[in-house]
Image (tube, rainbow, N blue to C red):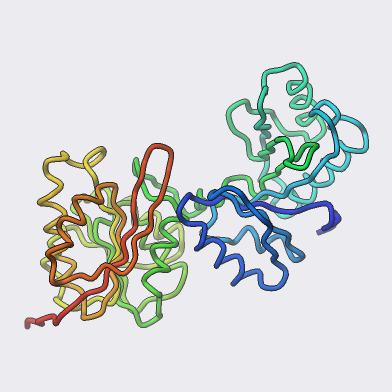
Amino acid sequence: MATRISSAFIHFEADVIDGLKPFAQAELERKLGAAFQEMPAATPTAIPFTFHGDWQQLNRLRTVAAVYAIAHFPIPRPKALLGHQHWQTLLRLIAAVRQMHPPDAFRTCHISAAGSHTPTLRRIQQTLAADTGLAYDDQAGDLWLRLRPAAAGGWEALLRLTPRPLAARPWRVQNLPGALNGPTAAVMGDLTQPQPTDRFLNLTCGSGTLLIERLLAAPAALAVGTDVSLSSLHLAQANLDSAGVTASLVQQDDSAAALAAGAFDAIVADLPWGQLVGETEEMPAFYAQLLAAAARLARPAARFVLITHLPRLLESLLTPSAAWHVEQIIHLRRDNLRPRIYLLRRLGKVHHHE
């Protein structure tokens, strides 16, 4: 980067989905190596850290929702940020972030802070827009800046490193209401322990999020997505094309009768739960059918990773099951929602039919 910021002055923070922090920590350690050093955090949705490396590496993380560069200012209140020295420091940080992206990547800016409609914050907003040449957006912005009191005193400015959160995948050109977010799908794909020899199946594939995240993580010998909705499959194909990956899409119900028994090493599913798809009273029969279909299609010891907002229903079906062993349950928290990810392992023998 042409603009340099002292690493002693800047640290970073990754926003993570509540419940996925251990997976994000593992990815940061694996991908950033010795240049990464985690700092103490009191929240399950943030990973503060120092990093002495190429900032572009932070923009390629898959399991975090966003990454921010954080500058600390020893000031008593935000108004003092407009002092020449502090403001120039902030502008240098902004320049460093903008230089990582094409010239037209940032068109708007936004400041997230308590009291955003006060005269002081309005002045900061206007000055930011004027000095960056970006239009100020009261609701959102490509250049996203957060201001908050620092725990040790003073104030912190958190600048997102990308025009959109990392969770907003660039390949997504078509969307379905309630579609799975990228970090959760990436973790689910990783739980299948991807191998290039995998025969991978995504039941209820919707707009293709799980398929794409798995194929972006590693190649597969075969990747198949099934969904009863032809319109969903059209959306999935558009997203697959955008991501530059290939999978076979099959329109059928989730009994998956046209697929060979015991054909798949890894299966994933984002299970509907009645709010957006179908009626709640239909869910027990649907879940039972899907578990039976997955059991028929999985080879012995195959992994089945699924996410549901109806854990009691799922567990009531798994308890008497001779087909699946529950290896791991991951509890997530998203606003008022409490979904769970299940990692299942196929038990017993699969009977192949000609």
Q: Which quarter of the rendered picture does the C terminus lie within?
A: bottom left
Could you tell me residue 268's position as x and y percent?
30, 64
Residue drawn 20% across the image and 70% down it = 324
Residue 307, above or below 159: below
Residue at the far top in the pictured view = 119
Q: Which quarter of the rendered picture does the N terminus lie within?
A: bottom right
Residue drawn 26% across the image and 76% down it = 302
Could you tell me residue 136's position as x and y percent?
68, 28
| Residue 34 horizontal side relative to residue 238, left or right | right
Could you tell me residue 330's position as x and y percent?
38, 58
Residue at the far right in the pictured view = 84
Residue 323, above or below 237: below
| Residue 45 horizontal side relative to residue 238, left or right | right
Q: In terms of depth relative to the viewer, which is nearer, 132 or 265?
A: 265
Q: Quadrant of residue 287?
A: bottom left
Residue drawn 48% across the image and 55% down it = 171
